[in-house]
Amino acid sequence: MNKALVLFTAALFVLAGCGSPKKNGKPVVFVSILPQKYFVERIAGDKFEVVPMTGAGQDPHTFEPTPGQMMKLSDAELYFTIGITFEEVWMDKIEEANPKMKIIDSAKGIELIKMPVMEEVFGHTDGEEHDHEHGLYDPHIWLSPALVKTQASNICAALCDFDPAGTALYSANLAAFVSDLNKLSLELRTRIAESGVTRLLVFHPAWGYFADEFGLTQIPVEFEGKEPSLNQLRIIIDFAKKEKIGALFVQPQFSEISAKTISEETGCRIVVIDPLAENYIDNLKSAAAALTENKGGLLN
Ligand code: ZN
C-alpha cells in the first residue's frame, strides 16, 4: 500500500469527520500486535473495543496499516505501543490520523536487552555492533511473562486514567492476570528445568526475553534480520551438528528456505512456535512443550 495514498485517505476521512460508528458505543483502543489485545482485554474486560494493527499471520516487521485501519484510528481514544518495528515507521502518521488519541508506551519501565550477536556460533567480530532489522535493541518483550506484568500495570494505569469510574474493576482484573502470569512462569520454569534443555535454536530471534526468564540461551539463524549467507549457513550447520541440536524453531509468519537446508543437513526437526498468537497463556505453554518434547536427548 502506498503510504501517501493511505495518508491522503485518512486525512480526507478526518476532515470529513465521518469516523465509522463505534461498536456498541464502546471506547476504541488500538494495539500493535495480537498478544497485546489479550493483555488489554484481560484488564479492560468487555468495556473497550480492542483493535490490533497486525492480525493473525501478519508480520509486524514489514507491516503497513491499511486505509481502513487509518480511518478506524480516528475513533480511537488510546493506542498502546510496544516498540515493534512498524511503529518506528508509522507512529508519526498514526498520531496525525488522530491527534486527540492518547498514545501509551506499554513498555515503560522495561529495560531492553540488545539483539543477540552470535559470538558462540560466528566467533568474535571486533566489537562491531551488529544491527538487526529491529535496530540494536530487542523489541520482543511480550514473550517474558515477568515483563508482561509490567506491561499489564502500564495498561491498567492508562485505563484507570481514561475511565476513573472503572478503577476497581481494572485493578481487580490486573491482580487476576498477574496471578495467572505468576502461575504460568512457575509452570514453564519447572518444566524447562526438569527437561534439561538449555538452548533454543530459532530462525528469527524473538525469544530472547523468554530465554532470559527461563535460563535458556537463544541461538538465532537469521543474521541481522536477514536469511544467513551460504557461508553463515555452513557455520550454523556445522555448529548444530557438533552440538547435536535436535530441533530448529521457526515462526509461522516467516518463510524460511535456509531452515529446510539446516534440517536436511543436520537431521534436526523443524518445529513451529508462534511468538504472536493472541491466546497468550496457552500459546506459551505450547511453546514450552514443543521445546521440552523435542529434546530427544539431542537439544542440549
Ligand atoms: Zn521480531
Image: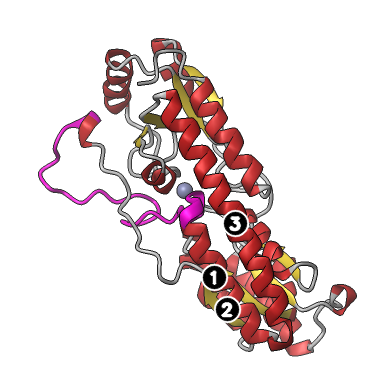
Of residues 43 and 64, the one drawn nearer to the viewer in this rendering:
43
The residue under label 2 is: 157
When the figure is inspected, residue 242 is found, relative to residue 159, above or below; the finding is above
Q: Amino acid at mark 1?
A: Ser
Q: Is residue 70 visible?
A: no
Whether the magenta-drawn stretch holds residue 247 is answered as: no
The numbered mark at residue 186 is none
Gap between marks 2 and 1, in whole Å? 6 Å
Total number of numbered discs in the rendering: 3
Give me the residue at 68% from left, 81% from top.
167
**Label 1 near label 2: C-beta < 8 Å?**
yes
**Quarter of the figure with the C terminus:** top left
Of residues 90 and 154, the one drawn nearer to the viewer in this rendering:
154
Give me the residue at 59% from left, 79% from top.
158
Indicate which disc, 3 or 2, sits on the residue closer to the N terminus.
Answer: 2
Boundaries of the magenta span: 121-146
Gap between marks 3 and 1, in whole Å? 13 Å
The residue under label 3 is: 179
The residue under label 1 is: 153
Q: Residues within 10 Å of mark 1 (few under 14, many from 20)?
A: some
Give the main secondary structure of the magenta stretch.
Answer: loop
